[in-house]
Image (cartoon, rainbow, N blue to C red):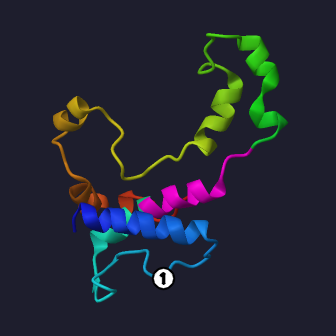
Amino acid sequence: LDAQSGYESALTSLLCALAGANFIHDAAGLMEFALTTCYEKYVIDNEILGMVMRAVEGIAVNDETLAFDLIKQVGPGGNFITAKHTRQFMRDEHYQPSLSDRDSREEWEARGGKTTWERAAEGGSCYRLSWR
């Protein structure tokens, strides 16, 4: 399992999903034309599929999400981070990964610098096996 396995899974899954497929056959844990399965790849592919499904879901654009009143209130150069509207929509609009490491390099190294493969191998029941 290497970077090629990951980017092939990501691109294949994303393109199939964007084309409207509702079942992506070779998306989870399969390698070598489905002759090999891999537990760690199941965990990694689950993360990829979560990102893909979030991308396919799209971004809701309506009066509530555009928040023109808030934009007027905050004004140019203002900060939206502390706004109730931001807190309300942030968790749903931004994919929250189970496996991916979003810390700085220093924090990652301080925790032992485990690779995605190593974190997936440890995953077991620690990672949710659904995209939402």
x and y percentages locating residue 64 in the rendered image: 81, 35
The answer to whether any part of residue 40 appears in the image is: yes
Please name the residue shown 59% across and 21% down the image.
81
Name the residue that disc number 1 marks: 25
Looking at the rendered structure, the secondary structure element under dot 1 is loop
Identify the main secondary structure in magenta: helix
Point out residue 89 in the picture as x, y percentages from the top left corner. Answer: 67, 37
Q: Quadrant of residue 41?
A: bottom left
* Magenta segment: 48-60
Say which quadrant the N terminus sits in: bottom left
Q: Is residue 50 within the magenta segment? A: yes
Mark 1 residue type: His
The answer to whether residue 116 is magenta is no
Residue at 62%, 44% in the rendered image:
92
Q: Quadrant of residue 42?
A: bottom left
Q: Tell me where residue 44 appears, x and y as whole percent.
A: 35, 63
For this view, does 55 lie left or right of residue 129? right
Q: Give the percent coordinates (x, y) of residue 107.
A: 24, 32
Instruction: Give the answer, above or below, for where 39 lies relative to 79.
Output: below
Q: In the drawing, does residue 62 fall left or right of residue 52?
A: right
Q: Residue at the spot x=44%, y=49% of the render? A: 97
Relative height, residue 14 to residue 79 (above, below): below
> Can you tell which quarter of the image residue 73 is in?
top right
The furthest residue to the bottom: 35
Q: Residue at x 64, y 30 (%)?
A: 87
The mark total stands at 1
